[in-house]
Amino acid sequence: MSLLAVTRLNALQERLSNLRPVLKVIGEELTESTKHRFETSTTPDGQRWEENAESTLLGHMRAKTKGSLLTKRGNTKASAIKALAKKRPLIGETKQLSTKISYRLDGDTTLLVGSPLIYAATHQFGRGNIPARPFLGLSPADENTIKTELIDYLSP
């Protein structure tokens, strides 16, 4: 085996023994990709999330319009209609779920992406009358990003 081949193999072995740098880069990319799903209201595989239930929208509108959705004449307030048209699934008043996405490295080889919010799993998997709206997971673009980052990191 040539000296160049041995040098390259040693460099590869060194990079393989420390994946943390590339996992951090991948973690940042997956965090941003996951946050973007809240803007597009789509699952990792590109399916649209189920729209909000009427009861959810009405509750949101009551909060926005200080309790009443109607004018004194009994018409729907223009502000309520405008806000209702903009309301996307999983985007609440605080927008916490859409912003509290992060990654964590567990040891030297495990990357976890998720949300610390207690209700995140309910929205990811659904429960009772709350439909599943998956926001965690890998899209085809995410898989390509991971492959590209790993190839770049492991290449001499």
Image (spheres, rainbow, N blue to C red):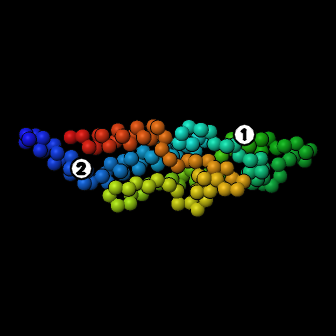
Q: Secondary structure at mark 1?
A: helix
The residue labelled by disc 2 is 15
The residue labelled by disc 1 is 85
Task: Report x, y in % for residue 34.
Answer: 51, 46
- The amino acid pointed to by label 1 is Ala
Q: Residue at x 42, y 40 (%)?
A: 143
Cα gap from disc 2 to disc 1, whole angstroms: 50 Å
Camera-side residue of 128 and 41: 128
**Residue 45 can be seen in this image:** yes
Camera-side residue of 113 and 60: 113
Q: Where does the C terminus fall, quadrant-wise? A: top left
Q: Residue at x 82, y 48 (%)?
A: 69
Q: Residues within 10 Å of mark 1 (few under 14, many from 20)?
A: few
Q: Earlier in the sequence, mark 2 or mark 1?
A: 2
Q: Is residue 47 above or below residue 60?
A: above
Q: Is residue 47 above or below residue 110?
A: above
Task: Report x, y in % for residue 18.
Answer: 27, 54
Task: Report x, y in % for residue 135.
Answer: 56, 47
Camera-side residue of 62 and 31: 31
Q: Secondary structure at mark 2?
A: helix
Task: Report x, y in % for residue 126.
Answer: 64, 53
Q: Residue at x 66, y 56 (%)?
A: 127
Q: Where does the N terminus fall, quadrant-wise? A: top left
- The amino acid pointed to by label 2 is Arg
Foreground mark, 2 or 1, reads 2
Q: Residue at x 56, y 37 (%)?
A: 46
| Furthest-front residue in this view | 1
Q: Residues within 10 Å of mark 2 (few under 14, many from 20)?
A: some
The numbered dot on residue 24 is none
